[in-house]
Image: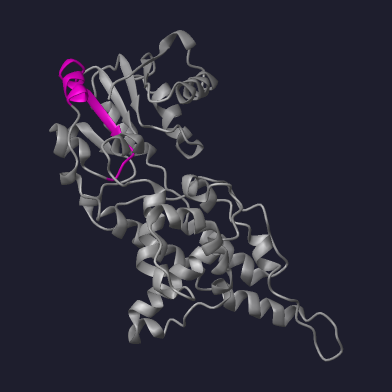
Amino acid sequence: MNNFYIIGNGFDLAHKLPTSYKDFAYFIYKEYIADTQPGYKFLEREEFLKESENILRTLQDDIWDFPSSEVEGIQPRSYEEGLILGFLGILGYERTTDLWSNLESALGDIKYKSIRHEIDDVVDNDGDFDMRKIGYVLEDGSQEWTNAACKFKSTFRDWINTVEIEKSKRKESFCNYLKEHKGYFLNFNYTETLQKLYCIQDQDVLHIHGFRGDGENSIIVGHNSGEIKYESSMLGYNDNIRSLHAALKKTLQLDSLKKFLNTCEDITNIICIGFSFGDSDDEYIRALINHPKTSRAAWLLHEYDKDEVAEHSRKLQGFGIDPLKITSEKIL
């Protein structure tokens, strides 16, 4: 047990599981958007993805038109739809080239300044700028944003629970690899693919972002950005956007990782499969590099794409890993 696997979403995707953020986007579309569009025409997945950015922009007005919380007790479905559509409107201001491939980063880089400028300044009878009234407009319009973020996260959990691992098949090549390279698993996925397809014991797997089998509050999704760079002159609006930013922030589980590593044997190899080395997970890589059980390990990258391997190798070297300790191999 001297191997340590880092498993990312590419692992589930290689098993033909619909676990990309684009699959999540399509789930939202089917659940909340499809029957709300004027001149409704249901879009299949690929057709939706081509239009998804445009669809989000049509929802931008919804961010100032959240349903009253009173609706929750009368028409809970309408209230939830309003929260989701409003939140998607907020994402519609994000100018990321491919939002659904960079969702977590986008959650930490919402363009609050652009949103603020969508609201016209309010003037009094003399034509002077009325800061008090515009402050009320911005504060009232944004006070449901944190609830919308919570609904967005609960919808993410709902989607994860629809993934059917039973429809997937294990890869014999990986099965054979595991027989010769036993180890522990740091799993960034929310699914039990390792346990169900490869009979890995639960105690040998750390689901660092939570596990869908551990209850609705265990799933961790969000950004790892710093403080908001924009601040308006309206205090109430500022408070609401800070609350939203905090609600969308990912809580790092570094203590959980350290405890898990403490139970491991000394690790000779760290094997990365389907892991994207996204910036939001940098702290976990640093923790592995600095922990005595893993600090001297060599790094092996699954060779899915040569350009990707080169990029990940450069990132590891940026962390101070000797390039001679970084190799690649096709594992799956």
Q: Is residue 209 above or below residue 85?
A: above
Identify which residue is drawn at 32% across, 39% down.
Answer: 13
Quadrant where the image shows the C terminus: top left
Identify which residue is drawn at 68% across, 62% down.
Answer: 114
Residue furthest top in the image? 324
- 100 magenta-colored: no
Magenta highlight range? 172-190
Q: Is residue 291 above or below residue 279?
A: above
Q: Which corner quadrant of the image does residue 268 belong to? A: top left
Q: Is residue 50 above or below residue 289?
A: below
Identify which residue is drawn at 42% across, 11% down.
Answer: 325
Viewer-proximal residue, 270 or 170? 170
Q: Position of residue 300 (x, y in %)?
A: 36, 17
Q: Is residue 222 above or below residue 266?
A: below
In this orientation, does residue 200 appear? no
Q: How is the image coloured?
A: one colour
Identify which residue is drawn at 29% across, 17% down.
Answer: 267
